């Protein structure tokens, strides 16, 4: 079969961004489809028919498929979708299978620049909504919440002829495998994480404490203990202006405090962080979180970035000033806590070694680090 029945990830993403994708046929199993799927900034029609039902039986489903639009088929790895695209083309449809399927889509990253002074970039993992931050000042770089695929992070650092001085993880990640330790080893620098989150870690790390200060070229970085999502969650204030918050605050929600199974204790920490710790910072402070719940949380420049004032105005938990009411509200929003998150934590503590295939399996699905959306 030729390339006429396929579309590359890059080409597909370009068309998605241009709002040229109108119809997707997703051939994965229903639970995989429910777990994550292709999302864009604009609406399009998406139909799920598992390949076990569809492949070889395409003619049964023709009345559910548009004749006047290109049908983009997505499967797990790209083989079934390419096959069925050719069959559909033979039946008079316009169809293309996404090369690499959802597996390939899950490794798609995009890089956006947030600031010139200091230089700040975000790399965004499109399918999962994971964001890594790179800050560069006078040839020195710090990386915050590095994902395990390091190419884009390294490319940004190389572009500015910088040397990585520090690698920080804001907290022990549960939804994805951190690349922080590997990046620090590559760069020959220290890896920092709060010791409360790294209890039992099977590797050496530098203990990240709230109140610590770091120099990065002409820039200053202040570490701020901001527990709640995890007890060791730490935020980083760059030059009193940019606040990297990890998962503590997101664009449409806050980091859920129930992933460790101690919702009452951690919600109390979160209450304090939101209403006391962050109260010291102005509305103009620019928040850069480490996760987005949806690609639609990115702005027109591809950044996941908003002001603290906006968060105060729009996020419901900022408006609940009674601790009891806060806890009740948190409990009312609880949702799925996937079992695989336990294994991901173990991997991130160096307590579980897994092969690439298992890493991919563990990371299936969008991140579920935020509480169910609760804008005012
Ligand atoms: Fe998290």
Image: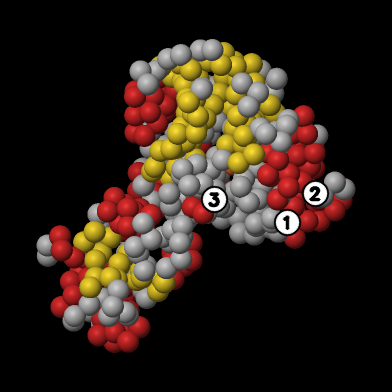
Q: Is residue 191 visible?
A: no
Q: In the image, residue 218 lies at what x, y percent?
A: 54, 12
| Ligand 1 visible in quadrant | top right
Q: In the image, residue 317 lies at what x, y percent?
A: 76, 49
Q: Is residue 147 above or below residue 334?
A: above
* Mark pair 2, 3: CA separation: 21 Å
Mark 3 and mark 1 in contact? Answer it, CB < 8 Å.
Answer: no
Q: Residues within 10 Å of mark 2 (few under 14, many from 20)?
A: few
Sequence-first tag of 2 and 3: 3
- Toward which corner of the image does residue 247 lie, by quadrant? top right
Read off the residue under disc 1: 376
Sequence-first tag of 1 and 2: 2
Q: Quadrant of the C terminus?
A: bottom right
Read off the residue under disc 3: 297
Q: Is residue 188 above or below residue 12?
A: above
Mark 2 and mark 3 in contact? Answer it, CB < 8 Å.
Answer: no
Horizontal arrangement in the rendering, residue 258 relative to residue 367 (left or right):
right
Determine which of the numbered discs, if any, sits on residue 319 in the image: 2
């Amino acid at each position: 079969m030729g390339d006429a029945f396929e579309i590359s990830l890059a080409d597909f993403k370009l068309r998605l961004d241009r709002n040229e994708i109108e119809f997707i046929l997703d051939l994965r199993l229903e639970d995989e489809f429910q777990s994550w799927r292709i999302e864009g900034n604009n609406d399009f029609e998406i139909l799920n028919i598992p390949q076990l039902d569809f492949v070889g039986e395409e003619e049964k489903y023709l009345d559910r498929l548009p004749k006047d639009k290109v049908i983009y088929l997505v499967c797990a790895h790209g083989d079934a979708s390419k096959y069925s695209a050719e069959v559909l083309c033979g039946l008079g449809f316009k169809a293309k299978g996404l090369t690499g399927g959802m597996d390939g889509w899950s490794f798609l990253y995009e890089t956006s620049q947030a600031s010139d002074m200091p230089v700040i970039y975000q790399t965004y993992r499109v399918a999962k909504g994971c964001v890594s931050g790179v800050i560069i000042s006078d040839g020195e770089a710090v990386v915050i919440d590095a994902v395990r695929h390091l190419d884009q992070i390294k490319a940004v650092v190389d572009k500015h002829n910088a040397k990585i001085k520090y690698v920080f993880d804001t907290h022990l990640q549960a939804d994805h495998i951190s690349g922080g330790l590997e990046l620090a080893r590559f760069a020959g620098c220290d890896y920092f994480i709060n010791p409360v989150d790294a209890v039992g870690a099977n590797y050496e790390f530098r203990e990240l404490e709230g109140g610590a200060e770091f120099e990065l070229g002409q820039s200053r970085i202040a570490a701020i203990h901001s527990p709640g999502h995890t007890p060791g969650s730490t935020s980083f204030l760059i030059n009193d202006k940019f606040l990297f918050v990890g998962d503590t605050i997101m664009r449409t929600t806050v980091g859920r405090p129930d992933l460790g199974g101690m919702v009452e204790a951690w919600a109390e920490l979160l209450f304090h962080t939101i209403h006391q710790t962050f109260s010291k910072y102005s509305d103009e402070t620019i928040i850069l979180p480490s996760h987005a719940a949806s690609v639609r949380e990115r702005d027109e420049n591809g950044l996941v970035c908003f002001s603290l004032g906006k968060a105060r105005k729009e996020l419901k938990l900022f408006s609940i000033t009674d601790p009891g009411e806060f806890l009740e509200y948190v409990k009312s929003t609880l949702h799925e806590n996937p079992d695989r998150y336990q294994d991901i934590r173990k991997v991130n503590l160096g307590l579980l070694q897994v092969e690439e295939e298992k890493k991919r399996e563990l990371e299936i699905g969008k991140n579920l680090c935020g509480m169910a959306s609760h804008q005012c």
